[in-house]
Image: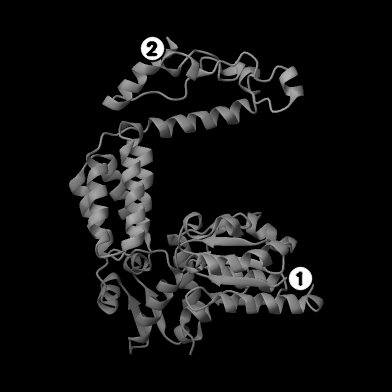
Amino acid sequence: MQPLAERLRPATLDQYIGQKHLVGPNAILRKMIESGNVASFILWGPPGVGKTTLARIIANLSDRPFYALSAVHSSVKDVRDVIEKAEKNKLFTPKPPILFIDEIHRFSKSQQDSLLAAVERGTVVLIGATTENPSFEVITPLLSRCRVYVLKPLDKEDLLQLIQLALTTDDALKAKQVTLQETDALLLYSGGDARKLLNALEVLVATETASTIVITNDMVQAKLQENMAVYDKQGEMHYDIISAFIKSIRGSDPNAAIYWLARMIAGGEDPKFIARRLIISAAEDIGLANPNALLLANTCFEAVHKIGFPEARIILAETTVYLATSAKSNSAYLSIDTALDEVKKSGNLPVPLHIRNAPTRLMAELGYGNSYKYPHDYPEHFTPQQYLPDALQGKSFWQAQDNDAERKLAERMRRFWK
């Protein structure tokens, strides 16, 4: 018999549970599917949230051939074989087939390169599934040809709906009288992963010989032999612990930061994921108070990528302690968000003429670049002149914060700009 998760795999969008922001009424993916005009895209989200199922539903509803490859087991030859089949079948199937690649982040650069031309020509519609940030794991040329849709862990309402669906529609489960007296442990164990939830439910029912089964929290812990506090790198605790880690760094508590780092390492977290978050923390929370933090965090990522565990733990620990004990500033983070808000509000304000580029004679005659003062011709390589659009003169986006490094920068700017 097939596993419960496979027996309950939905065949239509109406049967699909979760991801309402993508497939609910008037949601972006549902509109694309219903229009029949399916473009290449990547589904990014944790395991067990319906990436493969959604790809199969789309293929069925759009009446297209469906090819599925796993990046773990497939080679460049496998990719080329599918593309060759798609080319040969053009005469018989006017709609390009869907090529679904599970765990596309595991494809090498050469494997991803082999997809480029076929996606660009429309020979295949690519649907990739990944648990990793595509910005880091998918090559830029391929990523630029695909939309990215983010799938979320299933929430409590989704998971309870899934349990009820299993208990009321699956023949094997209906054969026993199952009562859900408590659900907290079962939901916590699932970590928002539908497959993990259904597998657990199947185990609980299969290991009971009685025809009447009452599911309680104690039963779940005893039967699954799981410590419910164990770190689950793919579930809700994954996000809670990385949040605690970053907030401990931001709060300048190296002891707490190292503890949460140890929890992630012991739980088998991807060291590159941790290193990427350290880069973000260095820019967002330390910033100009200590610009060397970003250099160290970036070096940490490169070193971890080359070395891997177990030695990578030392590099991650060094960087974590350095960031946690460093002076903090979010002035760069605040300044870019303030500037982006201004751009939304004021629109495309004209560039002042004197700082425009003048590559042609006509532009020069129109005054482009006229009266521009070259700062390097002046003492200290500075001379005051207008750089902001006229409508924003005097507007401040960056505000120095109270740390040694930025006090020096602020004093320099005050002396220059009076």
Q: Is residue 194 above or below residue 31?
A: below
Residue at disc 1, secondary structure = loop
Density class for disc 1 (Cα within 10 Å; few <14, some 14-19, many ≥20) is: many
Q: Residue 30, percent across and down?
A: 65, 60
User: In the drawing, does residue 136 fall left or right of residue 411?
Assistant: right
Find out whether the residues at labels 2 and 1 contact each other: C-beta distance under 8 Å. Answer: no
Q: Is residue 138 visible?
A: yes
Q: Residue 218, percent across and down?
A: 25, 72
Q: Is residue 319 above or below residue 168?
A: above
Mark sitting on residue 95: 1
Mark 2, residue position: 415
Question: Could you tell which of marks 2 and 1 lies nearer the N-terminus?
Answer: 1
Tell me the kind of residue under disc 2: Arg
Residue occupying the far right of the picture: 91
Quarter location, residue 20: bottom right
User: Front-most of 40 and 30?
Assistant: 40
Marks 2 and 1, how far apart in space?
A: 66 Å
Q: Is residue 403 visible?
A: no
Tell me the kind of residue under disc 1: Lys
Q: Residue 113, percent across and down?
A: 58, 65
User: Front-most of 194 and 275?
Assistant: 275
Q: Residue 324, percent across and down?
A: 24, 42
Residue occupying the far top of the picture: 418
